[in-house]
Amino acid sequence: MSELHIQRAESLETLSPAARALWQREQSRLQFDQTLGWNELLARHALERDERVCILSAHGPADECPGILPLKIVAPEGPWRLQTLRSLANYYCSLYEPIIDSSANRPAVLCSLLDGIDQLGCDALDLNPLADSADAAAGIIAALRSLGWRTERYFRFGNWYLEVNGRTFAEYFGALASQVRNTVTRKEKKLRQQPGLEISIAQTPAEAEEALAGYQKIYAASWKQPEPHPQFVPGLVRLLAERGWLRMGLVQLAGEPIAAQIWSCKDGVVSIFKLAYDERFAQLSAGSVLTAHLMRHVLDVDRAAVVDYLTGDDAYKRDWMSHRRERVGVRALRATRWRARAQLMSNGVAAALKPARRALRSIQQSLRRHPPTTPNT
């Protein structure tokens, strides 16, 4: 590949046309929360006050763009006030990766993008959540180490997902644990006996508005904390509906919304993003019934290949899913910068003291269990 040069954009609006075209071109293989539309929404509604967008893009001689690294600059961190770059992601995101042309030499483009970080004068880099694979986390670690960075890989969360393998809903449901099948069947029968029951799946923009109103009412009545960025989820629902990706389930009793779920169905991959139910109706298990209703739709109508619960090892997720994988993060320090060297020395001292701390704790615990006795005088 010809030598690449790096361009920097301080907003998604100022991204070069070539970079924007690459992001759109690669959209079909990206998860819904890696798309350009998602990132535009995130930058508009879900950044903290001290965070700033910073997008690096690699360009060739004819200004072709084979790679993009979406980042954000955050406030100086830690006792050494490290100048830190993080992935353009937050707690809403379940997967992050550099956007690299499928036909390009991925390691070479990735190295060019990461080498371009030097022009930003940062001390530390933190990319997450990444797939724990050779193309993702391992490839980033290898590239950073080749450029002289000191790296650390760390666990972020478990990710439960379902490999459909062409099954219908009846075939899938029949293979679930008998306890799950029996519970859902019993609860659905009980729920359908309730007067004024309505179970719907919103897909269009008009349907999305009605479902969103129900979701927000349920969310306000649920156990969940208020959204720190209240405009993000409504914006996402509207975006998914505009793209034709929305599968938003809503259960109502006599016009009263009692359970809602926000799912995305994009290019054969279904992502379960948000769940909420009104605790006053918890005994009806409307959430489980709604999950089964949505599963029937995405397997029998959408013919999804994968259903993904995105983040977390909650027990109920393994009831519905077939596989588990892990998402990880990569932290890196630029050893050529004095703040990063100071942090590395601090890390080294802390690591050296760990055995002594463990031994001291062991002695303290032993003394608590077997206090020394005072001899009689």
Image (cartoon, grey):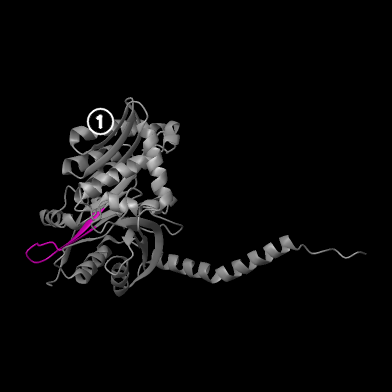
> Which residue: 25% across, 40% down?
237
The reply, left or right, for residue 211 in relation to residue 105 is: right
Q: Is residue 333 above or below residue 306?
A: below
Residues drawn in magenta: 54-69
Q: Report x, y in % for residue 321.
A: 35, 54
The reply, left or right, for residue 316 in relation to residue 118 is: right
> Which residue: 33% across, 65% down?
132
Residue 43 shows in the view: no
* Image quadrant containing the C terminus: bottom right
Foreground residue among 267 and 134: 267
Disc 1 target residue? 210
Foreground residue among 269 and 101: 269
Query: Which kind of residue does numbered mark 1 sit on?
Result: Glu
Q: Report x, y in % for residue 113.
A: 22, 65
> Which residue: 26% across, 68% down?
135
Q: Report x, y in % for residue 44.
A: 25, 42
Q: Report x, y in % for residue 88.
A: 29, 53
Residue at the extreme right: 377
> Which residue: 37% across, 36% down?
189
* Image quadrant containing the N terminus: bottom left
Q: Which picture quadrant has residue 187?
A: top left
